[in-house]
């Protein structure tokens, strides 16, 4: 009887870190859409040194990407080739020094805002309205409720694809609306944010108001958050509404009736369905208004 040999998996070629490596790790359940395929390999580094050492010896032909909490992300059904990095334990700490807040890149934006509140520090309340991690927020200059990262960032630390550690101040980030000029291969590991002394009750009230505004205006279901960037001089939701897309549905995915810049997985939608509906919305908007919407949701991976 002929013996069969197992085809080598990518994980067999990778350096052995102190953190955790998992082959063929499902990513869909780790995203807010609850849709999409697996990571060829998922890596949870133990700390910055572990991440740096791993990247320094990772074969150069292996692609790398970072996953936060999957709030503004669509993983295509064929999954993601290469290594997906998720910063969890070891990257979620939050500390306060005077009027500054230091946070690991894996810390939730909400938790950063709440920590500032607990220390009577104002200026970071807007973070409570941004779903995701602080590392992802810095990379894309995330913002909400009259605030964004460019207004509060003092400095950030990142590790590049070669494993080198970089410490940069805000001026070097090249921030613009929902964008930074940070190199695409940087994995942000921590940030230092500027705050100011404030009245704790007023800070808590502002965070509560933001939560109430989100509850009233945005769906809380299987959604990736804001789907399209607001074009200059326009609001994406108004363009979508004018194009008759409110409630539009393909299979198990629907444009939210509550806020039509949100797409909702009604239960069993595939990533292909979600992307197809987004593209149909874009087509109808450009046909009706001449404005071409750009995706704010990051789409990664390959089709099934």
Image (tube, rainbow, N blue to C red):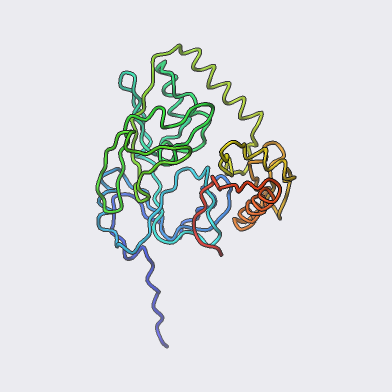
- Name the residue at 34% across, 23% down: 100
Quadrant the C terminus occupies:
bottom right
Return the x and y of residue 275 as percentages of the image width and height: 61, 54
Return the x and y of residue 13 as percentages of the image width and height: 31, 65
Return the x and y of residue 92 as percentages of the image width and height: 38, 36
The answer to which of 245 and 299 lies nearer the viewer is 245
Q: Is residue 165 left or right of residue 7?
A: left
- Name the residue at 31% across, 45% down: 46
In the rendered image, the vertical position of residue 266 relative to residue 95, given as above or below: below
In the rendered image, the vertical position of residue 65 relative to residue 143, given as above or below: below
Please identify the quarter of the rendering in which residue 213 is found. top right
- Name the residue at 65% across, 31% down: 217
The furthest residue to the bottom = 1
Quadrant the N terminus occupies:
bottom left
Q: Is residue 194 left or right of residue 31?
A: left
The answer to which of 43 and 206 lies nearer the viewer is 206
- Name the residue at 41% across, 22% down: 116
In the rendered image, the vertical position of residue 13 relative to residue 87, given as above or below: below
Return the x and y of residue 8 as percentages of the image width and height: 37, 71
């Amino acid at each position: 009887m002929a013996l069969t040999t197992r085809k080598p998996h990518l994980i067999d070629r990778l350096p052995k870190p102190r953190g955790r490596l998992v082959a063929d790790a499902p990513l869909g359940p780790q995203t807010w859409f609850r849709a999409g395929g697996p990571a060829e390999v998922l890596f949870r580094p133990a700390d910055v040194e572990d991440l740096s050492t791993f990247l320094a010896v990772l074969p150069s032909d292996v692609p790398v990407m970072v996953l936060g909490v999957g709030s503004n992300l669509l993983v295509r059904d064929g999954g993601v080739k290469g290594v997906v990095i998720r910063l969890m334990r070891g990257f979620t700490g939050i500390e306060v020094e005077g009027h500054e807040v230091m946070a690991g890149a894996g810390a939730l934006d909400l938790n950063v805002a709440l920590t500032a509140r607990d220390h009577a520090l104002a200026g970071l309340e807007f973070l409570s309205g941004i779903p995701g991690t602080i590392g992802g927020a810095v990379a894309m200059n995330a913002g909400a409720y009259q605030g964004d990262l460019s207004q509060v960032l003092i400095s950030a630390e990142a590790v590049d694809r070669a494993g080198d550690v970089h410490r940069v101040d805000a001026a070097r980030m090249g921030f613009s609306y929902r964008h930074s000029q940070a190199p695409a291969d940087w994995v942000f590991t921590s940030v230092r944010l500027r705050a100011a002394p404030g009245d704790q009750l007023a800070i808590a009230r502002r965070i509560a108001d933001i939560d109430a505004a989100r509850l009233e205006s945005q769906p809380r279901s299987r959604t990736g958050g804001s789907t399209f960037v607001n074009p200059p001089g326009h609001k994406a939701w108004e363009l979508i509404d004018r194009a008759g897309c409110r409630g539009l549905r393909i299979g198990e995915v629907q444009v939210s009736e509550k806020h039509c810049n949100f797409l909702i997985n009604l239960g069993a939608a595939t990533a292909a369905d979600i992307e197809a509906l987004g593209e149909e919305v874009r087509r109808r908007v450009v046909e009706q208004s001449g404005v071409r919407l750009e995706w704010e949701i990051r789409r990664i991976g390959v089709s099934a």
